[in-house]
Amino acid sequence: MSYKELGKLNDAEKQLISPDVRYSHYPERLVLAQFLIDRKKPEAAKDLIEELLNEYSPMSKSNVKLHRNTFA
């Protein structure tokens, strides 16, 4: 987010995309989705959010508890 504040949006996007790994880094991936919306890339943000929701559906009860706040 420091790159964003400095106006280096391409560098910021590269850094935010790096933890975009399936079945992990949920809070960071939500920050990426918001960043994409801010950068006028709503389709990419929508795809990412849909992917997150698809990952949430089959989660075990323990993982649902662990990630409840993120998905709320």
Image (cartoon, rainbow, N blue to C red):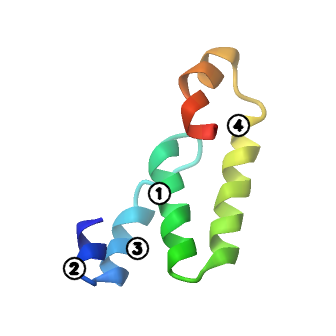
> Quadrant where the C terminus lies?
top right
Instruction: Answer with mark 1 or mark 3, whichever residue precedes in sequence.
Output: 3
The disc placed on residue 52 is: none
Q: CA distance from mark 1 to mark 3?
A: 11 Å
Q: CA distance from mark 2 to mark 4?
A: 34 Å
Q: CA distance from mark 3 to mark 4?
A: 24 Å
Within 10 Å of the Cα at label 2, are there few (<14), some (14-19), or many (20+) other Cα atoms?
A: few
Residue that carries the numbered disc 1 in the rendered image: 31
The disc placed on residue 56 is: 4
> Quadrant where the N terminus lies?
bottom left
The relative height of residue 71 versus residue 30 in the rendered view (above or below) is: above
Question: Nearer the observer, disc 1 or disc 3?
Answer: 1
Question: Nearer the observer, disc 4 or disc 1?
Answer: 1
In this picture, residue 47 sits left or right of residue 38: right
- Residue 27 position in % (x across, y down): 48, 45
**Tag 3: residue type?**
Glu
Residue that carries the numbered disc 3 in the rendered image: 13
**Tag 1: residue type?**
Val
Instruction: Answer with mark 2 or mark 1, whichever residue precedes in sequence.
Output: 2
**Tag 4: residue type?**
Tyr
Q: Describe the element under mark 4 as helix, strand or loop.
A: helix
Q: CA distance from mark 3 to mark 2?
A: 13 Å
Instruction: Residue at 31% x, 75% y: name it.
Output: 4
Q: Describe the element under mark 3 as helix, strand or loop.
A: helix
The relative height of residue 59 versus residue 47 in the rendered view (above or below) is: above
Instruction: Residue at 70% x, 53% y: name it.
Output: 51
Q: 55 or 7, which lies in front?
A: 7
